[in-house]
């Protein structure tokens, strides 16, 4: 117990999405992420129907507990949760178990302490048929009591590392990432530092969840990814972050920001490949992989939507490092560059966009 | 199930304490409430030691779940929760059960959706040894799954009614409360309307908690009250609210606010007597009364502290009805009147201040 609770307050960097419901808010600029949730809907429903253990949940005396980790401020989290509940109810009906009573659902919405929970709570769906709680804290540590969750969902959150790998901001390290804000087209040492950090983070994540999820419980992870064998520098994500990095360097050259500031800034975000995540889950050992799917048939965002989405997700972390006065000009510049290259980025390399859906099941024994 | 979840979203008026941590915030102006929590500490510890069923909690595979209902923004809620956890651990130690493992604690902080949960989450104690969740919603309805709580605490919240009794703002009712903002020195019909509303609200509260608390689980309620046999008009609370009401009427006469606005404003707050609460708990039937205690040995606040405390609790509800521009002048006026009469209010009637501590236990059968 003592050791476990020590981990409750693990320090991890927080990069909350833009709060409130204004022009640049995540609430208004997350329909790309939503389209992925919709695309994954059928698959999640299928997996629940095939794989969920119904014995424990058919008892009405025990609630079915769901957590959405990295929920942000809504509304995507509400769609995701509703999908899961509908799928569970559907399964109970098909199995003829709904007559003996559907369990009560208890839903836990988790994100960093600095997430805008006030907005999240204010936008909870009015007619919801589940009990609600908000859980502040990093998922790179324990958040829930042992064996207290039946189903965990996390969408567009695990690509955020718990921290920027230390070496990439260390001038004396071979992994020092000078003149760049991302690892996409950086040196092999930088790529390795990012990969090592992700590997460590996902291990921490899986081990914490292994304690919290009941044996036989399920977990669905959705995250942006790169296809097997594609270098990150050739992935859409990598190209977009490189483009953003080049805007920073342009502004540094024009004296609009400090070059040293660009050198010390790195996006703590990793794009994993299916093969790599498979390997990491197996190495952790607590979960079996029930499904690993690449979601590709998504509509391509236009330049303005793409810029707004990136801004909603990134302006918090950028403003913190560079000051918020840089934001408008940065994204104007980014939008222009993106318009110049959009046919190249969004079309020619369309097959390089991958969203990964991983369905895991907690093994019955450690 | 269907009937129960319908009650989840029961509409109740929200009167959140002033958020943030500024000059007039509840965070900075709630040490009177805190002194009551401290005064009740020993009693709660004693009751847990004597009355709590330890069999279910001595199992480490099941967390001990605590809810603080009407928690506001802290820090009082953290002291209250810490007291309870220490008392439970203490009991396990005394009974020689701590060697087989102390259970994990899961703490649920509840208040209205409009409560400032962002401030609450940001001020969670850093070294806490419990898991945390925030629960938005009115406690005059279901908030948690059935039989999912071991211990409930509610301090300075149940005096707030779910709504102003309808009759007191109805011009055609004999209970119309013209020229007053409170029932203290009002007609018998107004007093009756308030009493009926409280009786209904506490019944709803107890029935909802009866579903949520495990059989044998405990609940501690702390609230401002009046001694048996004291008319509310002679209680400190009644006198203070009457004084506040007279400030409103003064301002209406000076044209600084509208008299009709004062007529239509009523504080939805009730001061119960020990005998009355005893009767209501028995009528509800789900809980046994383990202890009913009046806490009186508290330091009397000075005029400025008293004004600031009242303001932190009331400026939200007053601003909503009258507009926030009235607040400063109202409380300046109140502070002056209070200074004139403070020796009368705070000293001569010292024995009229009562804080009530009620310890309940969920009966083993319905």
Image (cartoon, coloured by chain):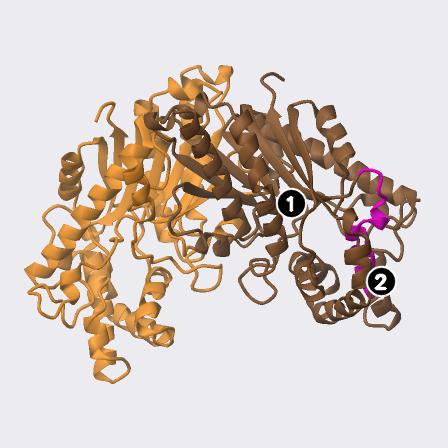
Chain colours: A brown, B orange
Q: Could you say which is closer to the camera, residue A16 or residue B352?
A: A16
| Whether residue B107 can be seen here | yes
Q: Residue at x 48, y 24 (%)?
A: B103
The quarter of the image holding the C terminus of chain B is top left
**B351, B189: nearer the viewer:** B189
- In the image, the segment drawn in magenta is A228-247
Above or below for A335 versus B87: below
Q: In which chain is the residue bearing label 1?
A: A
Q: Residue furthest bottom?
A: B255
For the stretch drawn in magenta, the main secondary structure is helix
Would you say B353 lies left or right of A41 here? Answer: left
Q: Is residue B299 left or right of residue A130?
A: left
Residue at numbered disc 1:
A157
B5 vs A11, left or right, is left
Indicate yes or no whether the magenta region holds residue A260.
no
- Image quarter of residue B280: top left
Label 1, secondary structure: give it: loop
Residue at image mark 2: A246
Q: CA distance from mark 2 to mark 1?
A: 25 Å
Please, what secondary structure does the residue beneath circle 2 have?
helix
Which residue lies at the image location 41% right of the left edge and 22% below the top edge? B57
At x 25% / y 51%, what residue is drawn?
B159
Please state the horizontal and vertical placement of residue A43, each as a whole percent of the image: 59, 37
Residue A159 position, x and y percent, is: 70, 44
Q: Residues within 10 Å of mark 1 (few under 14, many from 20)?
A: some
Does the magenta portion include A234? yes
Quadrant containing the N terminus of chain B is top left
> Is A250 left or right of A145, judged from the image as shown?
right
Q: A33 and B95: which one is in front?
A: A33
Marks 2 and 1 on same chain: yes
């Amino acid at each position: 117990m003592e050791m476990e609770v020590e981990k409750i307050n693990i320090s991890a960097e927080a990069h909350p999405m833009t709060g409130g419901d204004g022009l640049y808010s995540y609430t208004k600029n997350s329909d790309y992420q939503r389209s992925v949730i919709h695309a994954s809907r059928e698959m999640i429903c299928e997996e629940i129907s095939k794989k969920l253990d119904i014995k424990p949940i058919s008892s009405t005396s025990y609630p079915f507990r769901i957590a959405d980790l990295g929920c942000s401020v809504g509304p995507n989290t509400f769609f995701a949760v509703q999908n899961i509940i509908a799928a569970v109810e559907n399964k109970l009906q098909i199995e003829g178990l709904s007559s003996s009573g559907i369990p009560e659902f208890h839903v836990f919405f988790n994100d960093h302490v600095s997430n805008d929970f006030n907005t999240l709570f204010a936008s909870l769906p009015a007619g919801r048929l589940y009990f609600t709680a908000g859980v502040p804290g990093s998922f790179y540590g324990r958040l829930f009591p042992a064996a207290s969750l039946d189903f965990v969902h996390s969408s567009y959150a695990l690509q955020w590392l718990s921290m920027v790998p230390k070496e990439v901001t260390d001038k004396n390290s071979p992994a020092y990432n000078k003149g760049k804000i991302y690892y996409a087209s950086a040196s092999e040492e930088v790529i390795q530092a990012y990969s090592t950090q992700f590997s460590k983070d996902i291990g921490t994540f899986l081990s914490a969840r292994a304690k919290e999820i009941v044996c036989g419980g399920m977990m669905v992870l959705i995250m942006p990814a790169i296809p097997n064998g594609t270098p990150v520098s050739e992935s859409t994500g990598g190209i977009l972050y490189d483009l953003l990095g080049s805007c920073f360097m342009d502004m540094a050259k024009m004296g609009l920001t400090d070059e040293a500031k660009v050198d010390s800034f790195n996006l703590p975000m990793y794009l994993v490949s299916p093969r790599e995540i498979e390997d990491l889950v197996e190495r952790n050992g607590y979960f079996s992989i029930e499904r690993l799917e690449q979601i590709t048939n998504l509509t391509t965002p236009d330049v303005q939507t793409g810029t707004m989405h990136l801004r909603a997700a990134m302006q918090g972390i950028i403003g913190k490092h560079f000051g918020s006065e840089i934001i408008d000009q940065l994204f104007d510049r980014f939008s222009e560059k993106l318009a110049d290259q959009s046919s190249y980025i969004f079309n020619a390399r369309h097959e390089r966009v991958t969203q990964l859906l991983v369905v895991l099941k907690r093994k019955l024994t450690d």
